[in-house]
Amino acid sequence: MLKSKFKQDMEPIKSTKEITMKDIKLYCIDVDSTLTNGLYHVSSNGVITKSFHTQDFWAIRRLLDNGVFVLIITGAKDDCIVYKIKTFDGQDNQNLKICKGVEDKHAKLDYLLKNYYHLDWADVAYIGDATNDLKCLKKVGWGSAPNDAMSIVKEDIHYVCDAKGGEGAVCEFALEILKSKGWTYSGS
């Protein structure tokens, strides 16, 4: 069983600048099996529901409050994540973006980095669980996966969470980013 840890033999990618976790400016989050447990519940009339962990959204709020952009990126075309974000907390979410129905996450993220965020790949932390996340995970400054991610995904990343997808993995990695930036819990 893989334990949560930073892999000792891996360095963040090198670009035109050295990057440490405290320099992360954008946290990219996959949805199915990362922000959720990967289960789709479909009612007899076709309504799809998914489960989200409240700790993950608590951590996303902390990231936003501390100046980190958050991009939720998914291949799924349903609106579950859109409805969840609408109920997020009523605060300003202008630094939170959702991209759904994305067939090529690498191409989409590359486009957004160049044309929307104006950031380098090295400025990005990414958490994902499946082969459609691999190209991004290998190119970003810091890659992570839930503990129950596909084995091939967990091979070449910087951090494997103790938590499974939909059970706080997004929060766990977000807290590592926040701690690296000097954040401490203040009861909110």
Image: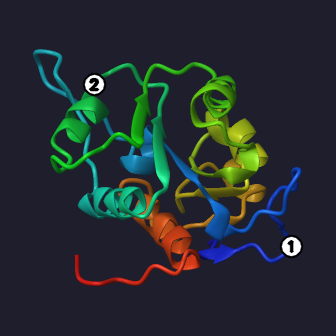
Q: Residues within 10 Å of mark 2 (few under 14, many from 20)?
A: few
Give the quadrant of the N terminus.
bottom right
Instruction: Please state the horizontal and vertical placement of residue 50, each as a whole percent of the image.
Output: 26, 39
Residue beneath label 2, please?
79
| Relative to 107, 146 lies left or right | left
Label 2, secondary structure: give it: loop
Residue 65 lies, with reference to residue 28, above or below; the image says below
Lateral position of residue 63 relative to residue 180, left or right: left
Depth check: give the residue in front, 109 or 37.
109
Give whichever of discs 1 and 2 has the lower sequence position: 1
Residue depicted at 73% across the width and 68% down the height: 20
Disc 1 designates what residue?
Answer: 9
Identify which residue, 174 or 3, lies in the foreground.
Answer: 174
Callout 1 touching callout 2 (CB < 8 Å): no
Seen at 65% across and 34% down, the residue is 113
Q: How many angstroms separate mark 1 from mark 2 (CA)? A: 39 Å
Q: Is residue 83 above or below residue 13?
A: above
- Tell me the element at label 1: loop
Quarter of the rendering containing residue 180: bottom right
Q: Amino acid at mark 1?
A: Asp
Q: Quadrant of residue 78?
A: top left
